[in-house]
Image (cartoon, rainbow, N blue to C red):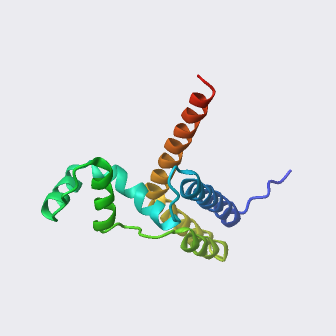
Amino acid sequence: MSLDFDLIQDLAADMESSIEATNEMIDFLANDAPERRTRDQVIVDVQAWPFAFTEEAKEFARNNGCTAKYVGSYVEWIAQNYKWPVTSDPVVSWRDRLNTVRQQADPHEALKRYCDFMSQTKVLRARIDEAAGQLDTHIQQLIDEARGK
C-alpha cells in the first residue's frame, strides 16, 4: 500500500485554504458590518482597533496632534494617521505568493516560501479572524434581541 504524498501540493493546498478563509472574512467584514467598508478600509480597521489602546498609540496620538474626544473618532484618527504595515487588501498578492509555491520544483524552497508566508501574515490573519468573530457575535446578539431572547 502506498500513500500519495506531494509536499508542494499539500503546502499549496493549506496555504490556499488560509488565503480563501481570510478572503471570505474580509468580504464579511466589508459587507455585513453595520457600516459598509471597502476591503482596504477593513484591512486598516483590523489593525487600528487593537493598536489604538496601546501605550504606543496613545503616545503617537499625543505627539501628532490628535484632538479626538470620543473613542470612535480617536480610533478613526489613528487609522488615518498611523503608518500601517498593510494598507490595502493583501489577497491578490497572497495568491501570487501561492502560485510561486505551486510552481516550485524544490520541496525545500516550497516549504521555506510557505513558512515565510504563514509567519509573515500570521498577525494580520489573526486580526481579521478576531474582527470577523466579533462581528458574528454582534449579529447573533441582534438576532437574539429581535427574537426576544
Q: Position of residue 5 (x, y in %)?
A: 74, 59
Q: Where is residue 61 in the image (x, y as percent from the top left)?
A: 19, 59
Q: Image quadrant for the C terminus?
A: top right
Q: Which residue is drawn at 41% across and 62% down?
A: 44
The image quadrant of residue 144 is top right
Q: Nearer the viewer, residue 144 or 19?
A: 144
Q: Is residue 64 left or right of residue 29?
A: left
Q: Residue furthest top?
A: 149
Q: Which of 84 and 118 is in front in this view?
A: 84
Q: Is residue 139 left or right of residue 57?
A: right
Q: Nearer the viewer, residue 111 or 129?
A: 129
Q: Residue at x 54, y 54 (%)?
A: 29
Q: Residue furthest left?
A: 63
The image quadrant of residue 120 is bottom left
Q: Where is residue 49 in the image (x, y as percent from the top left)?
A: 36, 51
Q: Nearer the viewer, residue 138 or 107?
A: 138
Q: Which residue is drawn at 45% across and 64% down?
A: 41
Q: Residue furthest right?
A: 1
Count of all numbered marks drawn on residues in the image: 0
Q: Is residue 6 left or right of residue 74?
A: right
Q: Where is residue 145 in the image (x, y as percent from the top left)?
A: 56, 29
